[in-house]
Image (cartoon, rainbow, N blue to C red):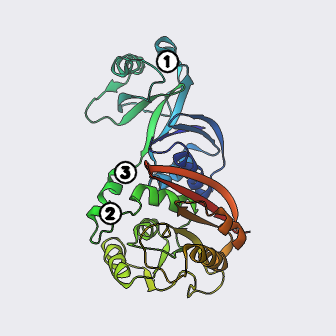
Amino acid sequence: MLYAFELSGEHDTLPRAEVFACLDIAGAVYNEYAFFDQCLVVDLDGSDGFIEKKIKWMSKRLSMSHNVIRVAGICDNDVDTIINMADNSDINSHIIAGETYVVRAKRIKHHTNIHGANLEGKVGGTIYRKGYSADMENPDVEFRLILTGQCVFGSIVASINRSAYEARSPQKKPFFYPGVLMPRIARALVNLSKARDGDVFFDPFCGTAGILVEAGLIGTNVIGLDVQIKIIGGARMNLEAFLSDYSLFVGDACRVPLVDECVDAIVTDPPYGRSAVIKAESLHQLYAHSFAEMYRILKSRRMAVVVSEQPVDGFACDAGFIVVETYFQKVHKSLTRIILVLYKK
C-alpha cells in the first residue's frame, strides 16, 4: 500500500531522512516508491489497520512533515489526466457511505501552473458523482492533491501538529538563551538518533535543554550535562515546564560521569566558535575528548547525532564512530550547521 508523506520545505533532505528514521523505529517494512519535491511516497507492507496504527504513532514524533496520505493515484500534472485518474480511482478504502469529504490542493513551488481551487472543484465533482456529499467546513475525510513533480492524490490519515513545536519555541520557554536549536530541528535530530520510548538519552552539552525536552516528550529517559551552573539552572526550569522526570549534572563533557555503554542515543549541539565557558584548553581538545567520551558511553549498534559549525567528522572517526550521513543546514549568510549522524559498531 502506498502512503505519501507531505514534507515541509525547510530543508531539502532532512524531512525525508526523518521519515525513514521513524519508519525504522516503528519496525515498518517498506520501500521508497518515489521522491518528489516535498513529497515522499513509500510502499508499506501489512494490513491498512496495522500500517495506519504505525503512521498515527509516527505523526506524534515527526516534526518536518505536514500530513500522511493514503495514496489513491499518481499521475502527470495535467488537469484532464488528474481528473481522469481521480474518476478511475477506487476510493472505497478512503471514504465510506454516509461520510462527507473535501478536496484540497497543495501546489509545491513552480512545478505546475494548475489553478488549485479550480482543480479542487473538478476532482470533488468526481467524488460527488460516486455518491458522496461534500462538506467544506467539517468533512469526515480530506482528500489531498499534492502538485509536485507529479500529482499525488489520496486521503489524509494523519497530520502533524506543528503548532505544538511553535508553542515550545525558545522565547516562550521559562529560560531563554540565544543561538539554540528550534524545537522542530531538535525533534528531527532526536528522530535521526532512532531513540525509542524507554531509552536512555544523553546530551553532553545540554545548554537550555531544548534537545532534552524533545527527547523526553517521546518517552526517553533524558540525561543532560553542561559545564555552566547558570545554564543547568535554566535547563532545569525548561525541563520542569514539560517533563516530570529527568536528570541534570554540572560537569565536563571531556570527563562524563557515566559508565561505559550505558546510553542508547546521543544528540548534542556543542559550543563551536561561540563565546562559551569550557574546561578544555582548546576547542580541538574539547572535540577530541568529548567525542571519545560519547563513543565510550554509547551502546554498540546505536546512533549519535552531533551539530557543528565546522567539519568535525575527523574527531568522530578518530573516536571510532562511522559517519552514516552528513547534512547541511543554512541558518543565515554566515552560519551553516553541519549535522553528523554517527554509528557505533
| Residue at x 63% of width, y 46% of height | 46
Left-right relation of 110 to 295: left
The label nearer to you, 2 versus 1, is 2
Q: Nearer the viewer, residue 292 or 182?
A: 292
Residue that lies at the very extreme toward the top in this rendered image: 80
Cα–Cα span, label 3 and label 1? 29 Å
Residue receiving disc 1: 82
* Residue 161: numbered disc: 3
Q: Secondary structure at mark 1?
A: helix
Amino acid type at mark 1? Ile
Cα–Cα span, label 2 and label 3? 18 Å
| Residue at x 61% of width, y 76% of height | 294
Amino acid type at mark 3? Asn
* Residue 57 place in picture, x, y as percent: 49, 55
Density class for disc 1 (Cα within 10 Å; few <14, some 14-19, many ≥20) is many
* Residue 5 place in picture, x, y as percent: 51, 41
* Residue 267: numbered disc: none
* Residue 306 place in picture, x, y as percent: 56, 64
Q: Quadrant of residue 233?
A: bottom left
Residue 207 can be seen in this image: yes
Amino acid type at mark 2? Pro
Left-right relation of 309 to 167: right
Density class for disc 3 (Cα within 10 Å; few <14, some 14-19, many ≥20) is some
Q: Which quarter of the figure is the C terminus placed in?
A: bottom right
Query: Looking at the image, is mark 2 or mark 3 earlier in the sequence?
Result: 3
Query: Looking at the image, is mark 2 or mark 1 earlier in the sequence?
Result: 1
Residue receiving disc 2: 170
Q: Secondary structure at mark 2?
A: helix
Cα–Cα span, label 2 and label 1? 43 Å
